[in-house]
Amino acid sequence: MLLVEKLTKSFSQRQAVSSVSFQIEKGEVIGFLGQNGAGKSTTLRMICGAIEPDQGDARIAGYSIVRHRRQAQRLIGYLPEGAPLYPDMRVTEFLNFMADCHQLQGSARQSAIDRVITDTRLSSALGQTIATLSKGFKRRVGLAGALLHDPPALILDEPLDGLDPIQRSAVKTLISTMAPDKAVLISTHNLDDIPAMCSRTIIIDHGRIIADETPDALARRGAGSLETAFAELVSETARVTH
Amino acid sequence: MKGYLPYLLTTTATAWKREVSTYFATPLAYIFLAIFLLSVGLFTWDISGFFEAGTADLNAFFGWHPWLYIFFMPALAMRLWSDEKLLGTIELLNSLPVSLSGLVAGKLLAAWTVAGAGLVMTLPWWIIVNYLGDTDNGVIAVSYLMSWMMAGAFLGIGSTVSALTSSSAIAFVLSVAASFLITAAGWPILSVNIDSVFGPTLSEIVSQFSFMTHFSPAQRGVVELRNIIFFVSFIGLSIFATRLLIEYRRRVPK
Ligand SMILES: Nc1ncnc2c1ncn2[C@@H]1O[C@H](COP(=O)(O)OP(=O)(O)O)[C@@H](O)[C@H]1O
Ligand SMILES: [Mg+2]
């Protein structure tokens, strides 16, 4: 469903992402794990076409984000880091704006809007201006926008960051219920999110993939603890690179 | 390229709709319209002594337009793209299957719509001059059209500049400076100076790019196609330039 091939990006002299490759099938939820500055957001941005790779490509159902940008982007739902939104818009206005952008029309449009309102439990906030919403609600509005066109690939950049425990578990549940018919890629720097949500973990460090395995397999490396496994992997690359 | 035009137009309409509603959701449009009307009134009726002159035309009114637009159009356009950068929503836009040219055009058209609304609200003065005497309404109609065209070109400058920065204040200042230069390029004082220092060819070239050169014939009631073409091309070029800047930032993010 989602094929990432040797994505590479530098900022001025600094290489942020170096030849990152992986593949995600329908039904998988991938935890994209890495410390701050590891290159998670840069990778996700390239997959969605928000920035252009220096080298490499990402294919969504065969469509290259570099050569068939529009077709590929139709199949992606993307929640950027921090869920940026237009503060002056009401929730319904934002959903209608997203529906316009995806050219949803007629009854399909209204049913899509109704579906995401139910799924992200937004009905109590519909008439509110986005600026007046709590952080948890804002995140759900961003998610609703990403889900509106029912995309086969869902790319979420730190969707749980900055949410309180109740909001976190609500978002996790939502992601789990959608998982079976989508390829989901979720970045996080928090190990606690991994076991409950993810079928596979990809770890990125200094712009390179250093592990790609199930959470169980990863935990076994650290004698049952994801924390230990992660810390060991990261310190290993630190020894190699410095 | 089949299907490109509907795609372009759909995005243009989407962006226009969203931007117009933002202008009116925030106080910006109302503040703009109020201060614009006050300034036009002040300059025309007070400073130019419209009623003392007692002529039944709107020459004094239109004469001020380029100078007022130097400040008013940058104010309308300053946040078109800088706000997207500041809020981070540019990242969302860049990930959507929409036409970038359509987004740029739609936003510009929205600002142009508000500018047009400002002009429409001055129409009562057109009625007033008709009471004062024998008015050449053809001249006034042409002047309104060309003033609106010129406003679009100023907004093109503002839109392009706002794609350079995430600060709408910086965008405003830079657009005012750029707008002033392109207006003053046709100023007789400047032309005479360029003429004496660099020779008549350069002064001719410089003044050919001036908005004044292409706007002032309208005040004599002359609709010159080439002036309309000038403003339309300028707007088209600014859409292209804005698009290039946004695409550049996709390759080389800040
Ligand atoms: N727009 C940018 N300009 C310059 N450097 C950047 C930019 N975006 C990211 N970086 C750098 O690239 C590296 C990876 O960043 P990022 O992908 O945001 O990491 P993560 O999302 O894993 O925290 C970091 O060193 C960061 O400072
Ligand atoms: Mg990040």
Image (tube, coloured by chain):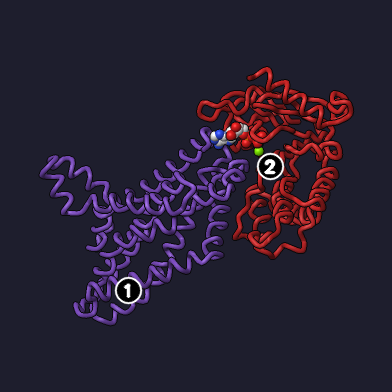
Disc 1 element: helix
Q: Is residue A86 left or right of residue A186?
A: left
Residue at the farthest top position? A240
Residue B192 in the image: above or below residue A14: below
Residue at the farthest bottom position? B131
Are there few (<14), some (14-19), or many (20+) residues within 10 Å of tag 2?
many
**Residue A55 percent coordinates (x, y):** 59, 23
**Residue B222 percent coordinates (x, y):** 25, 59
Are there few (<14), some (14-19), or many (20+) residues within 10 Å of tag 1?
some
Which of A139 and A161 lies nearest the eye of the viewer?
A: A161
Q: The residue under label 2 is which amino acid type?
A: Tyr
Callout count = 2
Q: Is residue A113 left or right of residue B24?
A: right
**Residue B231 percent coordinates (x, y):** 34, 51
Q: Is residue A69 left or right of residue B167?
A: right
Disc 2 element: strand
Q: The residue under label 1 is which amino acid type?
A: Gly
Q: Image quadrant of residue B250? A: top right
Q: Image quadrant of residue A64? A: top right
Chain identifier, red in the render: A
Q: Is residue A44 visible?
A: no
> Which image quarter holds the N terminus of chain B?
top right
Q: Is residue A187 left or right of residue B83?
A: right
Q: Residue at x 63, y 19 (%)?
A: A242
Chain identifier, purple in the render: B
Q: Which residue is mark 1?
A: B41
Q: Which residue is mark 2?
A: A78
Which chain letter goes with mark 2?
A
Residue B117 in the image: above or below residue B155: below
